Amino acid sequence: MPLSEMVGFTCTGDTYHIAFAFMGKENIDHYEWVLGQLAELYAKVGKRPETLVTDRDIAEMNAINELFPDAQHLLCWVHIMRNCVAYAMGLGMPEGTGWGFA
């Protein structure tokens, strides 16, 4: 069962937990429900998220565009680096070299 974790970042770079949700599937319907709950939490304090960071899950990205159209959407740098290393390995980069993210 997939777990969706929502965290925030402080100006000093610390993270804090906002919410967790177990989802039946990682599809747009489930992401819309989870993000809808997040929108309700933000509405209670009169705010909206300005930036959302994901691992490039297409269903999640579509749900974000639907529920938070004004929010900036960024890709997680850890996932980007892992993909770069995986791509480089496919080009013949020797194992054990690189950035150590894989």
Image (cartoon, helix red, strand yellow):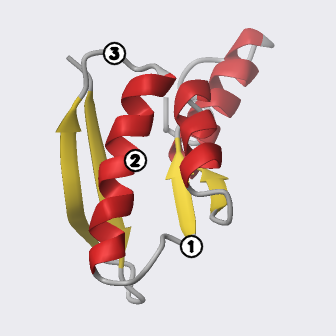
Tell me, for residue 69, which label it has, or none: none
- What's the distance in space between the residues labelled 3 and 1, CA to CA? 26 Å
Identify the residue shown where x is 49% and y is 38%.
101
Query: Can residue 76 be seen in this snapshot?
Result: no
Instruction: Depth check: give the residue in front, 79 or 64.
Output: 64
- 59 relative position to 48: left or right: right
Disc number for residue 35: 2
Residue tagged 3: 25
Mark 3 to mark 2 CA distance (whole Å): 14 Å
The amino acid on which the numbered mark 1 sits, given as a three-letter code, is Glu
Q: Amino acid at mark 2?
A: Leu
What residue occupies the far right of the structure in this picture? 91
| Tag 2 secondary structure | helix
Name the residue nearer the viewer: 102 or 93. Answer: 102
Quadrant housing residue 58? top right
Contact flag, marks 3 and 1 (Cβ < 8 Å): no
- How crowded pointer 3 is (Cα within 10 Å; few <14, some 14-19, many 20+) is rated as few
Residue 5 image point, x, y percent: 27, 46
Where in the figure is residue 102, as x and y percent of width and height? Answer: 49, 29
Residue bearing the label numbered 1: 50
Question: Which residue is at 35% across, 37% downward?
Answer: 33
Give me the residue at 68% from left, 16% from top: 89
Label 3–label 2 contact, CB within 8 A = no
Residue 88 seen: yes
Mark before the other along the chain sequence, 3 or 2: 3
Q: Secondary structure at mark 1?
A: loop
- Please tell me how many numbered marks the rendered image carries: 3
Q: Earlier in the sequence, mark 3 or mark 1?
A: 3
